[in-house]
Image (spheres, helix red, strand yellow):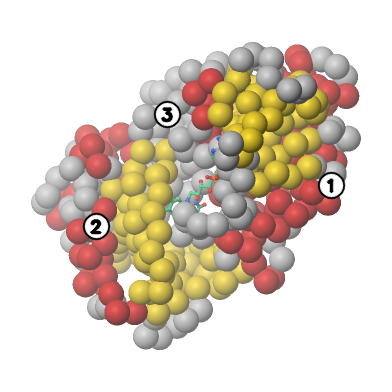
Amino acid sequence: MQPETFDVLVVGAGPAGSCAARTAALGRARVLLVEKRRQVGLPVQCAEYVPWQLAHQVPIPPRCIAQTIRQMRTVLPDGTTVDKPAGGMVLGRALWDKHLAVLAHQAGAELRTEWTATAYDGREVLLRHGPREARIRAQVIVGADGPHSTVAGWVGQSQSEFVHGVEVEVVLPELRDQTEIYFAPLYRGGYGWLFPKGETANVGVAVNVRMGGQPGPALDHLLDRLGLSRAAVVGTLGGAVPVGGPVAEPRAGEILLVGDAAGLAHPVTGAGIAPAVLSGQMAGEAAAQAVAGQDLAALERYPLEWEARMGAPLRQAVANRRHLDAHWTDDPAALSERIRETWIAFPAYGRRKSNTEAPRG
Ligand SMILES: Cc1cc2nc3c(=O)[nH]c(=O)nc-3n(C[C@H](O)[C@H](O)[C@H](O)COP(=O)(O)OP(=O)(O)OC[C@H]3O[C@@H](n4cnc5c(N)ncnc54)[C@H](O)[C@@H]3O)c2cc1C
C-alpha cells in the first residue's frame, strides 16, 4: 500500500481540529482532516456555553446559537448566591462543530469521517476505517483528538487528571436567561450547572472520581434541588474534561497538540471551547508557515504563542483547583469559604500563587 502524502494531517474534527485545518488550508497547505465519528459534532459532549468574545475569533452563525446569556449565578453550599455579568451564548454544538468542518473544507482541507488514526511509526500515520487501512505521510501532524488523545500518547503527553461529567437536556417549566453554577459537598472536586437553551436546559454535574465523586447520584441531587423531573429529560450525555493543565510539551518535532489533547481546558471551570479554537488557529498558522518555508523550526512559534496568551491563566487555575481539591470538606460553611478563595466569581480567585512550572516551549 503506497502512502498518501499531505502537508498537514489533522486528527480530530472538534473545534480545535477544524480550526487548525481551516487555518492551515488558508495558508495554502494541503490538509487532511480525519474524524473517527460517523458525523462531525455528534454525539455532543458539552454544556455548550461560550463567552461573547469567541465570536470575534471564529464565525458563529445565528443558527448555531441556542440562547444568549447575560450573567452567571453562583450558588454556594451555604446558600449564598452571587451574580456576575457574564455575557455569552449557549451554542447548538452539533450544528456549530459541523459548520467549522464545513469552513475547513471550503478553505481547501480534505475531510474523512469514520477514519481513526491508530498508529505512527515516525514516518507514516496509520488510519483505519473498519477493515480498510490507509497510510499518510505528512510534514506536520496536529493532534486535535480530545481529552484521551491518541496522538498525545505517541509523544508521551497523555493526561491523567480529569473530572467526569454527566448531563441531561431537560424541559424547563419557564425560560431562564442566566447560567447557574451549583456547589455542594456531594459534587466532589467539581460543580453542577444549568445552562438554558430556550425551552430546554443543559443540566449536569462534573465530579472528580478519584476524590470519591459519583456523577449519577450528584446529578440526581442537582435535579431534586432544581425541582426538575427525570420525566422532562429529552437527552443524556457524558464526557471527561482534562483539568491537570497544559501538557509539558505541546510540540514534539513535527507533532503539535491542540485543544483538550493539549490539556487546554480551564482546570477550574472546565471551559475548553475557546482555548480549542485559539490553539487550533495558532497551530494551523505555524503549520502553514513551516510547510511554506520548508522549515519545521517555524513550528516553535506555536508553543511560544500559546504560552504567552494562555500559560499564566491556566497555571493560576491549576493552582486554584488543586487548593480546592486538597481542602474539600463535607462541612457546607467551610467548603463555601474554600470556594470563595478559588472560584472565578470571587475577587480572591487571582490571588493564589501559581507554583506549577511553565511548560518548555
Ligand atoms: C460534560 C461536559 C461539559 C462541557 N461544557 C463546556 C462548556 O459549557 N463550555 C466550554 O467551553 N467547554 C465545555 N466542555 C469542554 C469542551 O467540550 C471541550 O474542551 C472541547 O470540545 C475541546 O475541543 P477539542 O476540539 O479539543 O476536542 P473535542 O471536541 O473532544 O474533539 C476531538 C475530536 O477528535 C475525534 N477523535 C478522537 N480520537 C480520534 C482518532 N484517533 N482519530 C480520529 N479522530 C479522533 C473525536 O471523535 C472528536 O470529534 C465540556 C466538556 C464536557 C465533557
Residue at (54, 65) in percent of width and height? 90
Disc 2 crowd, CA 10 A, few/some/many (<14, 14-19, 20+): some
Cβ of mark 3 under 8 A from ligand 1: no
Task: State if disc 1 and disc 3 touch (CB < 8 Å).
Answer: no
SS class of the residue under badge 2? Answer: helix
Residue at (46, 42) in percent of width and height? 266
Q: In the rendering, at what x and y percent does residue 323 appear?
A: 28, 35
Cβ of mark 1 under 8 A from ligand 1: no
SS class of the residue under badge 1? Answer: loop
SS class of the residue under badge 3? Answer: loop
Measure the C-alpha gap from mark 1 to mark 2: 42 Å
Q: In the rendering, at what x and y percent does residue 125 appear?
A: 65, 24
Residue at (21, 72) in percent of width and height? 224
Residue kind at label 3, given as amino acid type: Gln
Disc 1 crowd, CA 10 A, few/some/many (<14, 14-19, 20+): some
Mark 1 sits on what residue? 107
Instruction: Give whichever of 186, 13 is nearer the camera.
Output: 13
**Snapshot quadrant of residue 191:** bottom left
Q: In the rendering, at what x and y percent does residue 298 appear?
A: 77, 19
Mark 3 sits on what residue? 159
Mark 2 sits on what residue? 216
Query: Label for residue 87?
Result: none
The quarter of the picture where the C terminus appears is top right
Q: Horizontally, is 89 left or right of 199 in the view?
A: right
- Vertical comparison of 277 with 44: above or below: above
Task: State if disc 2 and disc 1 touch (CB < 8 Å).
Answer: no
